[in-house]
Amino acid sequence: MIKIAVLVSGGGTNLQALIDAWKSGGLRGGELSLVISSAEEAFALERAQNAGIKTIVIARKKYPDIRGFDSAVADALAENDTGLVVLAGFLSILGEKTLGAYKNKIINVHPALIPSFCGKGFYGLRVHKAVLEKGVKVTGATVHIVNEVVDGGRIILQKAIDVLPDDTAESLQQRVMKECEWVLLPKAVAMFCNGEEKI
């Protein structure tokens, strides 16, 4: 059984999709064993606690630099005997220690079709606003390996949806989450835990 740690910063809707998949047997070979939040007030912590998952808060604001924060995250992951790290709405950048210790074992879900609308500064509603401003007709989500380049790791899965004429950034965000992110992320995690995706 692969122990999965989920890193969060906010509401935890992608975490909830993973919890639902886990509870229904959809993560085959994976166990949600830890949720780490970079923010003390993240609602994701309540979701995890309600599901009986251990939680830790490693508040980014309490560390003067990325190195100290990253070291605390890496240590917490190691203590948990983590086999797979999932970034699910995690708004902090990981550093060398975590990336080195979990090379090819960290995945992220991004709310756009990489290589479009990705990289530093592209997160949350900013992505969907940029999609609408550019006038593209198709968007979606991507699950990818995390490396030292923001949103630059190997793509595992993608799913596309049409941008509708009356879409707002908020409506687009909701549809991308429901139709793409919440489908792709549990599927990618199951692939890792099942040996279908090489770690």
Image: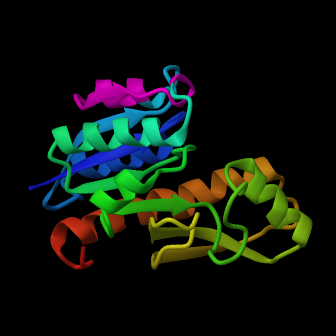
Q: Quadrant of the N terminus?
A: bottom left
Q: Quadrant of residue 149?
A: bottom right
Q: Is residue 75 magenta?
A: no
Where are the magenta residues, as a range?
45-62
Q: Is residue 16 among what the camera can see? A: no
Where is residue 49? Give x, y as percent: 30, 24
Residue at image coords 36%, 40%:
71
Where is residue 141? Give x, y as percent: 58, 67
Q: Quadrant of residue 37?
A: top left
Q: Is residue 171 left or right of residue 195?
A: right
Q: How is the protein colored in the picture? A: rainbow
When the figure is inspected, residue 128 is found, relative to residue 17, above or below; the finding is: below
Q: Is residue 130 left or right of residue 38?
A: right
> How many numbered discs?
0
* 64 or 80: nearer the viewer: 64
Residue at image coords 55%, 34%:
10
Q: Is residue 64 among what the camera can see? A: yes
When the figure is inspected, residue 107 is found, relative to residue 88, above or below; the finding is: below
Q: Residue furthest left?
A: 1
When the figure is inspected, residue 141 is found, relative to residue 57, above or below; the finding is: below
Q: Is residue 146 left or right of residue 198?
A: right
Q: Is residue 105 left or right of residue 115?
A: left
Where is residue 93? Give x, y as percent: 54, 49
* 167 or 40: nearer the viewer: 40
Where is residue 108? Give x, y as percent: 46, 60
Q: Quadrant of the C terminus?
A: bottom left
Residue at image coords 34%, 66%:
187
Q: Quadrant of residue 189?
A: bottom left
